[in-house]
């Protein structure tokens, strides 16, 4: 079995939202706490960074070029240089207590972004969607920390996770892609790790980064664990598929809240890993504006 390998000489604070750009042969990702979007061009090993004025929870590449970016206080359209062009909407949560976190696009090119409830005293976070005409809509509430957004190849299910509550949900979608009532897909016990960011493969299996679990895992459409791949760091944060054949898994990890002793013991915390896999992943849509 292949072992995860470090992509290049880099460690971030809280890398998240890895996103493969097929036309550029490049990987993008956010470092949430540093307020950055990174780009790594695989053929040339060129690494570049865009800086923003506050935390970047998640983003998606726009069909027109540039990004849609969910920051602490608002969601913005930005050009390819990171210049903010238009505010789409404010954070509907209390931005002092809930920053944006995980997000991505569905097959219709609509942008989903969820929040993370900082105080941790109740499930005060939510998931919202930006439609193609830039209309914002809150989709789900009663969430502590939204993560794990992914959509099945048949377009019938949306998967999400609530990381602090150690649960993966799935939500049925109608023909227009509108969500119904979510249901529990899998709960995790102490010691398994808790489900963070995720991606879907072409067989409808769900790949989850198991934060605090030292591993990533692949789950069948019925919730059975089919594979696990161990990592040399405690906290993977998200996975995405990429490469020429979409059979390379990119894995972001973090060193957030780690003391100096743990970072010294596990210096690759915050690195990005690659892993060849046998099944291709689903391609992410760009955000489409109309």
Image (cartoon, rainbow, N blue to C red):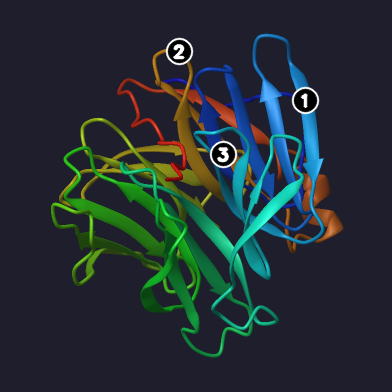
- Return the mark for residue 18: 3
Between 133 and 214, the residue placed more toward the observer is: 133
Q: Mark 1 points at which residue?
A: 47
Callouts 2 and 3 close, C-beta under 8 Å: no
Whether residue 211 is situated above or below residue 17 in the rendered picture = below
Q: State the residue in front, 138 or 39.
A: 138
Which residue sits at x=76%, y=60%?
A: 258
- Note whether residue 195 is visible: no
Residue that lies at the very extreme toward the front in this rendered image: 290
- Which residue corresponds to the image point at 55% horizontal and 26% vertical from the top-left? 274
Graded by Cα atoms within 10 Å as few (under 14), some (14 to 19) or many (20 or more), the crowding at tag 3 reads: many
Badge 1 element = strand
Query: To which residue does mark 2 refer?
Result: 244
Label 3, secondary structure: give it: strand
Residue at image point 62% right, 34% down:
28
- Residue 35 locus on image (x, y percent): 77, 54
Q: Disc 3 versus disc 1: distance between alpha carbons?
A: 14 Å
Crowdedness of circle 1 by 10 Å Cα count: few (<14), some, many (20+)?
some
């Amino acid at each position: 079995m292949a072992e995860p390998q470090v992509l290049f000489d880099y460690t971030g604070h809280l890398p998240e939202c890895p996103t493969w750009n097929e036309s550029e042969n490049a990987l993008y990702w956010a470092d949430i706490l540093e307020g950055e979007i990174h780009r790594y061009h695989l053929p040339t090993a060129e690494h570049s960074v865009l800086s923003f004025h506050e935390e970047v929870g998640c983003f998606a590449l726009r069909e027109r070029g540039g990004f849609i970016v969910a920051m602490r206080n608002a969601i913005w359209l930005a050009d390819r240089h990171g210049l903010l062009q238009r505010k789409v909407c404010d954070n509907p949560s209390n931005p002092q207590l809930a920053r944006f976190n995980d997000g991505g696009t569905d097959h219709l090119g609509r942008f989903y972004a969820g929040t993370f409830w900082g105080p941790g005293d109740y499930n005060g976070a939510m998931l919202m969607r930006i439609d193609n005409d830039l209309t914002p809509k809150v989709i789900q509430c009663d969430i502590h920390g939204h993560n794990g957004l992914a959509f099945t190849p048949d377009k019938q299910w949306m998967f999400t996770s609530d990381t602090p509550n150690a649960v993966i949900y799935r939500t049925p979608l109608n023909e227009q892609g509108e969500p119904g009532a979510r249901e529990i897909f899998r709960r995790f016990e102490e010691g398994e790790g808790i489900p963070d960011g995720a991606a879907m493969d072409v067989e409808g299996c769900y790949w989850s980064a198991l934060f605090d679990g030292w591993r990533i895992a692949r789950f069948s459409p019925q919730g059975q664990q089919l594979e696990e791949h161990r990592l040399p760091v405690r906290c993977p944060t998200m996975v995405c598929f990429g490469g020429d054949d979409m059979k390379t898994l990119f894995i972001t990890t973090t060193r957030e809240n780690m003391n100096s002793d743990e970072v010294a013991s596990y210096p690759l915390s915050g690195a990005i890993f690659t892993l060849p896999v046998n099944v291709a992943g689903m391609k992410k849509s760009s955000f489409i504006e109309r």
